[in-house]
Image (cartoon, rainbow, N blue to C red):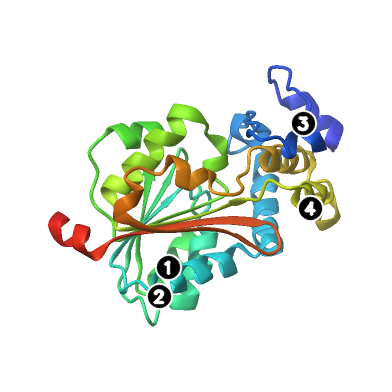
Amino acid sequence: MDVLIRSRIQLPRRTAVGGLAVLATSRTVEAELLDHLDPEDPAAQRSRRDLQRIHYAMGTLRALRRSIARLDLSPPRRVLELGAGDGTLLLRLAQSCATAWPAVELTLLDQHDLVSPRTRAAYGALGWRVSVLKCDILEWARAPTPHHDLCVTALFLHHFVGSDLTKILAAVAARSSAFIACEPRRDRWTWFASQLVGLIGANQVTRADAVSSVAAGFRCRELTAVWPDSANWEIDESFTLPFTHCFSARIRESVAGVRG
């Protein structure tokens, strides 16, 4: 199967990402294989299922809930997820907080509509109204869009570097009152773990992308450094076991009042 997958993926030659690159002072961002596959490609479908297992292994839902608790948010009415994929991660979050967060209007932004009827129905059963916004993230950053009480993203920001990352974060800060990002932690332990994702049944695409993701991940205060107007936001950036780098920001109440 791996040989067949390799023959279907037509990409420019990728530079090797090794352990030392992960520990470098700067991030190493490379195009990931899944991004170049047709959504209907069996390898892509399998890799998206792998990502669900990786979220479990990384404890992404736990990290999101921890960040939400730290932000001490009022129940949001409008929530946006960037790079939402199949929408199942936010569904798990919705299932854990639907009682406290009733009647949420959730927008799932992605380049493709990958949300199944079953997932949509599960949101509906919770009283959440879900819509998919098919859009390139940089197009979204340039265009005027509605304000959201909370914006979240998981395993997405590490795809971007330089001015693109700056533009995305600037758009998030302008259009939301709170933001949470869960990304790969760029360190030796996470890099070592990325070599072992085959043990949870990940295919060749996911195994390659896992290593690249860690090299492009974050550490220290790297996201804080590019967050716009940080003086007007309450910011937390920290490591959440076992492999997740978390960034959360909430606009200060004095500034929120001016915006309102």
Residue displayed at 81% across by 57% down: 200
Q: Is residue 135 visible?
A: no
Quadrant of residue 38 in the image?
top right
Comes first in the chain, label 3 or label 1: 3
Q: Nearer the viewer, mark 2 or mark 3?
A: 3
Q: Nearer the viewer, mark 2 or mark 4?
A: 4
Q: Position of residue 259 (x, y in %)?
A: 16, 55
Q: Nearer the viewer, mark 4 or mark 3?
A: 4
- Residue wearing tag 1: 123
Element under label 4? helix
The amino acid type found where label 3 is placed reads Val
Are the residues flagged by discs 2 and 4 in contact, CB closer than 8 Å? Answer: no
Q: Is residue 167 above or below residue 82?
A: above
* Residues at marks 2 and 1, CA–CA distance in whole angstroms: 5 Å
Graded by Cα atoms within 10 Å as few (under 14), some (14 to 19) or many (20 or more), the crowding at tag 4 reads: few
Comes first in the chain, label 2 or label 3: 3
- Residue wearing tag 3: 17
Comes first in the chain, label 4 or label 1: 1
* Residues at marks 4 and 1, CA–CA distance in whole angstroms: 36 Å
Q: Position of residue 206 (x, y in %)?
A: 73, 43
The amino acid type found where label 2 is placed reads Leu
- Residue wearing tag 2: 126
Q: Is residue 8 above or below residue 122?
A: above
Graded by Cα atoms within 10 Å as few (under 14), some (14 to 19) or many (20 or more), the crowding at tag 1 reads: many
The amino acid type found where label 4 is placed reads Trp
Residue displayed at 73% across by 38% down: 22
* Residues at marks 2 and 4, CA–CA distance in whole angstroms: 38 Å
Q: Nearer the viewer, mark 3 or mark 1?
A: 3
Graded by Cα atoms within 10 Å as few (under 14), some (14 to 19) or many (20 or more), the crowding at tag 2 reads: some
Are the residues flagged by discs 2 and 1 in contact, CB closer than 8 Å? Answer: yes
